[in-house]
Amino acid sequence: MAKVKYKFNPQSLDYEKIELNWKGKLKKALFYLASIAVFSAVVIFIAFSLVDSPKEKKLKREISQYQLQYDVINKKLEMMSGVLEDLEDRDDNVYRIVFEADPVPQSIREAGFGGVNRYDYLEGFENSEIIVETYKKLDLLMRRMYVQSKSLDEVYEMAKKKDEMMQCIPAIWPTSSEKTRIVSGFGYRIHPIFKTMRMHTGIDFAGPRGTPIYATGNGVIMEPKTGMSGYGIIIVVDHGYGYQSLYAHCSKKIVKAGDEVKRGDIIGYVGSTGLSSGPHCHYEVIRDGKKVNPINYIYNNMSPEEYNKAIETASKITQSMS
């Protein structure tokens, strides 16, 4: 029951009942409504601050699930990267070494992607940094997988051509082992004419003049370079796969530039042309433009004992024949 209010009338010296007109009643009603609204707003604010709404709870659960999924994805990416790294290592240090191919440069394996704003469509989200980093890892992994796939395709092709390559690599004694012997190896030696210590870039096989000289691997006869008059009559064979072989001081050659030869074919004869102290074949192996020790390749028609003896002989002699 609503309270009745009175006011004192000094003229009549009596209390009179207060009667509200419609404006007063309206103000009173509005006051009560405003109070209720303010109180409700405060209660709702406190409630939402302390207690999550069902929608918020759902969103938080989804965010938590997404975070867990990103963590799982990143762990899987790290595992895949580790497996791929092991495959890359075997590719460079096993497969390609078997086929004497250069390893794939790391700069090619990990080459970046073009475009400054490649991931700009992923910006502006609450977890943009995590998303962008994950996409970068995924793109890099895909790039490395693509390069590795191409590398394995190359290795597969090299494997198919392995027999052909093995026939081309210079791998036999360039002269008859029964008629010739090693008289000087690869390394610094005393030159027989100038009597000074010089780099001897091949192996000297001494033997009777006219002893046949054989191609040590399949290949094509090349035109010798100019400025090699000290070598006398020269035969150069391009074996492909980065290999060349050179035979110097010949008495005669029976091949010309452009001729195809097979391993074991006679290409010339032992002589003493050029700067030479006696009949012999000066034999060189060139790998990717660099002269290397031929003793490392003369193994195809020798027993292990003969090969070890040849190495020992080549290392002991300190003077070359040319």
Image (tube, rainbow, N blue to C red):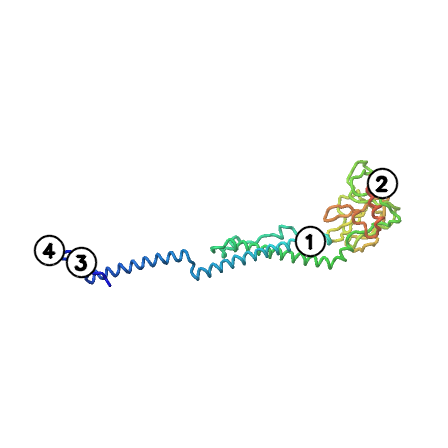
Residue at 81% over, 42% down: 315
Q: Amino acid at mark 4?
A: Gln
Q: Position of residue 168 (x, y in %)?
A: 77, 54
Picture quadrant where residue 8 is located: bottom left
Viewed as shown, does residue 174 lie left or right of 141? Answer: right
For this rendering, which residue is in front, 318 or 197?
Answer: 318
Q: In the rendered image, which residue does mark 2 sit on?
A: 277
Viewed as shown, does residue 97 lie left or right of 207? Answer: left
Q: CA distance from mark 3 to mark 2?
A: 146 Å
Which corner quadrant holds the C terminus? Answer: top right
Q: Nearer the viewer, mark 3 or mark 2?
A: 3
Q: Nearer the viewer, mark 1 or mark 3?
A: 3
Look at the picture and state if 304 lies above or below 190. Answer: below
Earlier in the chain: of badge 2 and badge 1, it is 1
Dot 1: element: helix
- Packing grade of label 1 (10 A; few <14, some 14-19, many >=20) is few
- Packing grade of label 4 (10 A; few <14, some 14-19, many >=20) is few
Q: CA distance from mark 2 to mark 1?
A: 49 Å
Which corner quadrant holds the N terminus? Answer: bottom left
Q: Position of residue 142 (x, y in %)?
A: 60, 57
Look at the picture and state if 155 lies above or below 189. Answer: below
Q: In the rendered image, which residue does mark 3 sit on?
A: 6
Q: In the rendered image, which residue does mark 1 sit on?
A: 90
Q: In the rendered image, which residue does mark 4 sit on?
A: 11
